Amino acid sequence: MDRFFLSHDPIGVDALRATLGSTHAGAFASFEGWVRDHNEGRPVAALRYEAHAKLAQAEGETILREAVRTFAIVDARCVHRLGDLDIGDLAVWVGVSAAHRDAAFDACRWIIDTVKVRVPIWKHERYMEGDAEWLHPHSDDRA
């Protein structure tokens, strides 16, 4: 079963959360990353995410499998948007179910941090001044 997804469509949080329900889970933690209107003091108009889809999917799946093995969790999902996004759009979502909240929170944080470092997804920010800039996975960007 896939745990990591790339999507050109808006993320359906309710449907994803429902896939994590289990009688073994007593906790659920999630992270939502939204497109913000600024970065490093510059006003952002919109952005575009691009990925090496095959590699991104494979690495994302690896990360989610690692999370399930490493943390005391029941299951996890992560979806990252691709394409053009506007300010306020949901860009990335992580959900984790676990028996206890500490494991759910810890795994959720680890998943988003690891996805941002290891998955080949690039952000192309368009600024209000009219110029644009590519931000790569290993930049200091924490969106």
Image (tube, rainbow, N blue to C red):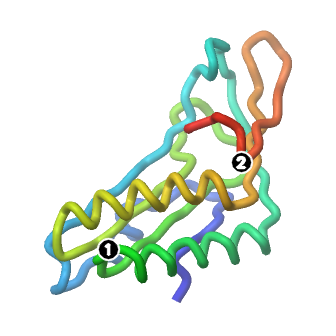
Number of residues whose C-alpha sits closer than 10 Å to that of mark 1, classed few (under 14), some (14–19) or many (20 or more): few
Q: Quadrant of the C terminus?
A: top right
Q: Please report the residue visible at 18 percent of the width from the left and 85 percent of the height from the top.
A: 24
Residue shown at the point (67%, 72%) measured from the top left: 59
Please, what is the three-letter code of the amino acid marked with disc 1? Ala
Q: Nearer the viewer, residue 140 or 83?
A: 140
Three-letter code, disc 2: Pro
**Among all residues in the image, which is located at the extreme bottom?**
1
State whether residue 29 is above or below residue 22: above
Looking at the rendered structure, the secondary structure element under dot 1 is helix
Q: Nearer the viewer, residue 47 or 67?
A: 67
Residue located at (41% from left, 69% from top):
16
Q: Quadrant of the rendered structure where residue 73 is?
A: bottom left
* Side of 28 relative to 140 (left or right): left
User: Up-down: is 125 above or below 61?
Assistant: above
Find the distance from the CA under tag 2 to the CA under tag 1.
29 Å
**Numbered disc 2: secondary structure:** loop
In which quarter of the view is residue 107 placed?
Answer: bottom left
Q: Can you give x and y, in whole percent of width and height, for residue 34 in the image?
A: 50, 39
Residue 21 vs residue 106, the one in the foreground: 106
In this picture, is 52 found above or below 88?
below
Quadrant of res 136: top right
Residue under pointer 1? 18
Residue 39 image label: none
Q: In front here: 95 or 84?
A: 95
Q: Is 72 positioned to the left or the right of 88 in the image?
A: left
Task: Tell me where residue 111 appears, x and y as whole percent.
Answer: 48, 61
Closest to the camera, between mark 2 and mark 1, is 2
| Residue occupied by mark 2 | 137
**Does label 2 or label 1 sit earlier along the sequence?**
1
